[in-house]
Structures are given as C-alpha cells and as structure tokens.
C-alpha cells in the first residue's frame, strides 16, 4: 500500500503504509535530530547537518549541503529486505550537484547493501557497495528540478530497472544479488556526499508494477509542482 496524505496547519500528514513497506520517510519533521520511519518496522534515522524545509504544498523535505550532511539509519541497513531480492526504492530528489560531480543519494556500509548515486556522467547509477556497477539511467538526472526516482528489482526475472517521473530509464538482466538490498545512509555513501534535496523516500519489499509507479507519480507530482 502506498502512502496517502491529508493537510493540516503544520504541513502534510501521511497515513501509515502497509506491511510491504519497510521504510517510509514522509510527513512532519522529527524532533531534534530524529527522522522517524513511518513503516511498521521502525528503521528510524539520526540526522546530522541536513536541514528541514517546506514546499508551498506543505510537504517537508531534507536539504543536504554536499559536504557532510547525512542521515544514519543505524547498523541494520534495513534487515527487513531479505532474499529473494525483490524490492522497490521510490523517492523525490532535487539534484544540485555541478556537472561532473559525484554523490551518493542513498548509500550503504562498506560490506553490505547497494548505493544509488549521481555519477560523474551526471546520470543516476546503481552499484553494489564494492563499486560493482549494475545499472545507469539512460538520461542524465535532471538538475535543479524535482524528479521522482524509482529503482526496482524483480527477482523472478533478475531485472533491475530505473524510472524518472514514471518513465523508463533503462533496465538490465543481472542475476547478481547483493549481500543486502538495504541502505544505511541518506545523502552520503560510496561516492561521497550529495548536494540536493530529498523527500518522500519509501522502500518496499516487492517490485512495483509499471502501473503502480505511474499511479504514485500521478498522486505525488502536484506536491512538487510537476505536471
């Protein structure tokens, strides 16, 4: 189940997602340096440096400075994501890295997990933490504009896929399964710190269909002024 929302004086409030969602950062900011996971699994994060800001729609997002800002989810790197490697990562980002720069939007620890990064080609790239390349987007990651990104893996077909704003950005059949499909950090990882804004991160323990991706984009785009 994908999160739905209502608005109040403080911003947008989101309903809790279903059991297939293992990480969900949406709604109001946490207190102090906390980022609260609204999924049933409690993968809360600790914010270092990154600042909260709010869009005109009432949606809150995190702003990363590209130097040392990050969110640490702890040592578990989302243990709810287990074999077989079926998963979907969905988030909105506003990339502010200069052309040719690199930075990990979502990153992992040294020995486990995957890294979703903005590579030196200005494209979005998915790698394992040992820097094994899996898949790059067909187009460059849009600069200074809000973009919905979906990274999906379907274990039944060993297919990895990337989508920007519900549009396919390439797929590859790769039977290699990382030790963990989880992440540990937001805003930093194997490709260093990332400069930009991040909102509505959700991780699911199954591959979304193309229709689900399209519905998610259609439902959320108005929050970011995307049409």
Image (cartoon, rainbow, N blue to C red):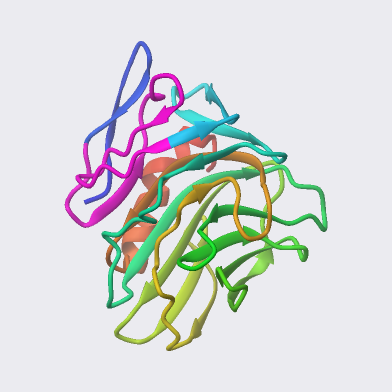
**Quadrant assignment, res 122:** bottom right
Q: Tell me if residue 209 comes above or below residue 32 in the rendering.
A: below
**Viewer-proximal residue, 10 or 32?**
32
Judged left or right of residue 100, residue 55 is: left
Number of numbered discs on residues: 0
Which residue is found at the position 39% from the left and 73% from the top?
153
Judged left or right of residue 98, residue 33 is: left
Based on the picture, tell me whether residue 26 belongs to the magenta stretch. Answer: yes
Could you tell me residue 2's position as x and y percent? Answer: 27, 48
Could you tell me residue 42's position as x and y percent? Answer: 26, 42
Furthest residue in direction top, as rendered: 9
Which residue is found at the position 46% from the left and 52% from the top?
184
Judged left or right of residue 194, residue 42 is: left
Which residue is found at the position 50% from the left and 32% from the top?
47
**Taken as a whole, is the magenta stretch helix, strand or loop?**
loop
Could you tell me residue 199's position as x and y percent? Answer: 48, 39
Could you tell me residue 148's position as x and y percent? Answer: 51, 51
Q: Magenta part of the protein: which range?
A: 16-45
Which residue is found at the position 31% from the left and 72% from the top?
86
Based on the picture, tell me whether residue 145 belongs to the magenta stretch. Answer: no
**Quadrant assignment, res 212:** bottom left
Q: Tell me if residue 60 comes above or below residue 168 in the rendering.
A: above
């Amino acid at each position: 189940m994908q999160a739905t929302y209502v608005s109040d004086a403080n911003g947008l409030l989101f309903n809790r997602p279903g059991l297939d969602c293992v990480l969900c950062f949406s709604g109001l900011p946490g207190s102090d340096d906390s980022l609260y996971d609204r999924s049933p699994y409690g993968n809360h994060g600790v914010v270092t440096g990154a600042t909260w800001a709010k869009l005109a729609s009432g949606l809150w997002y995190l702003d990363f400075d590209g130097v040392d800002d990050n969110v640490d989810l702890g040592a578990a790197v989302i243990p709810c994501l287990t074999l077989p490697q079926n998963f979907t990562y969905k988030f909105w980002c506003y990339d502010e890295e200069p052309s040719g720069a690199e930075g990990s939007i979502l990153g992992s620890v040294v020995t486990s997990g995957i890294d979703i990064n903005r590579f030196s080609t200005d494209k979005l790239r998915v790698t394992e933490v040992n820097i094994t390349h899996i898949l790059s987007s067909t187009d460059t990651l849009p600069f200074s504009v809000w973009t919905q990104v979906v990274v999906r893996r379907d274990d039944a077909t060993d297919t990895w896929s990337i989508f920007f704003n519900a549009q396919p950005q390439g797929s590859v059949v790769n039977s290699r399964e990382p030790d963990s499909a989880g992440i540990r950090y937001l805003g930093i990882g194997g490709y260093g710190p990332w400069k930009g804004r991040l909102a509505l991160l959700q991780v699911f323990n199954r591959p979304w269909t193309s229709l689900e991706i399209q519905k998610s984009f259609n439902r959320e785009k108005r929050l970011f002024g995307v049409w």
